Image: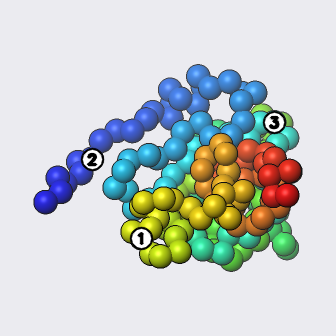
């Protein structure tokens, strides 16, 4: 019988965000509790940084702007983002982000991505991802990239090695 989880404070955005270097991009924090059903990431895009337009086919994502400003780009629109903005990114939508002159710090929350495996959950628990898919795993946050040659990770915003897929 498993022990039930108890609510707890995980971090203080008021302390973490100002203490992290504004030049540092990528994941500042990620939810790492073992038996969670959600994933969450706190991401910083440096000034004028961006996440290229991409499609996430599997998950809806909630995006909360914690600091800075920028734009949420889609095929037909560019929506302004400011501190306190909350955006819904529906699965199968095409979206990208552009940070403003002060950068953009945002929290993403979505259901936990199921592990990949050939023979079901037991195989994934024993050995993880199939070797043929390892080149699509972001080395910074561990998320599987939806597009094989995406220049940036859709979740943490880190630039991907262009030679990793070859």
Q: Answer few, some or many: residues within 10 Å of disc 3's Cα (few below 14, many 20 plus, some between 14 and 19).
A: some
Q: Are marks 1 and 2 in contact (CB under 8 Å)?
A: no
Q: Please state which of residues 60 and 80 is positioned toward the viewer in this rendering.
A: 60
Q: Secondary structure at mark 1?
A: helix
Q: Secondary structure at mark 2?
A: loop
Q: Residue at x 30, y 41 (%)?
A: 8
Q: Position of residue 12 (x, y in %)?
A: 45, 33
Q: Answer few, some or many: residues within 10 Å of disc 1's Cα (few below 14, many 20 plus, some between 14 and 19).
A: few
Q: Secondary structure at mark 3?
A: loop
- Whether residue 164 is visible here, answered yes or no, is yes
Q: CA distance from mark 1 to mark 2?
A: 27 Å
Q: Quadrant of residue 59?
A: bottom right
Q: Quadrant of residue 134?
A: bottom right
Q: Please state which of residues 101 and 4 is positioned toward the viewer in this rendering.
A: 4
Image check: 156 left or right of 71?
Answer: left
Q: Position of residue 103 (x, y in %)?
A: 76, 37
Q: CA distance from mark 3 to mark 2?
A: 35 Å
Residue on which the image places disc 3: 47
Residue 121, label in figure: 1
Image check: 18 left or right of 121?
Answer: right
Of the residues tagged 1 and 3, which is closer to the observer?
1
Q: Earlier in the sequence, mark 1 or mark 3?
A: 3
Q: Answer few, some or many: residues within 10 Å of disc 2's Cα (few below 14, many 20 plus, some between 14 and 19).
A: few
Q: Earlier in the sequence, mark 3 or mark 2?
A: 2
Q: Please state which of residues 2 and 62 is positioned toward the viewer in this rendering.
A: 2
Q: Relative to residue 83, is residue 124 depicted above or below? A: below
- Whether residue 107 is visible here, answered yes or no, is no
Q: Residue at x 70, y 59 (%)?
A: 136
Residue on which the image places disc 2: 7
Q: Earlier in the sequence, mark 1 or mark 2?
A: 2
């Amino acid at each position: 019988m498993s022990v039930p989880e108890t609510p707890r404070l995980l971090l203080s955005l008021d302390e973490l965000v100002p203490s992290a270097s504004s030049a540092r991009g990528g994941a500042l924090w990620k939810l790492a509790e073992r038996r969670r059903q959600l994933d969450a990431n706190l991401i910083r895009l440096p000034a004028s940084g961006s996440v290229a337009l991409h499609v996430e086919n599997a998950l809806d994502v909630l995006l909360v702007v914690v600091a800075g400003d920028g734009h949420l780009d889609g095929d037909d629109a560019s929506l302004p983002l400011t501190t306190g903005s909350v955006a819904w990114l529906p699965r199968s939508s095409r979206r990208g982000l552009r940070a403003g002159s002060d950068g953009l710090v945002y929290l993403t929350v979505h259901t936990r991505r199921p592990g990949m495996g050939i023979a079901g959950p037991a195989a994934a628990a024993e050995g993880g991802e199939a070797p043929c898919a390892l080149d699509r795993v972001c080395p910074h946050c561990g998320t599987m990239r939806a597009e094989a040659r995406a220049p940036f990770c859709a979740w943490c915003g880190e630039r991907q090695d262009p030679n990793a897929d070859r």
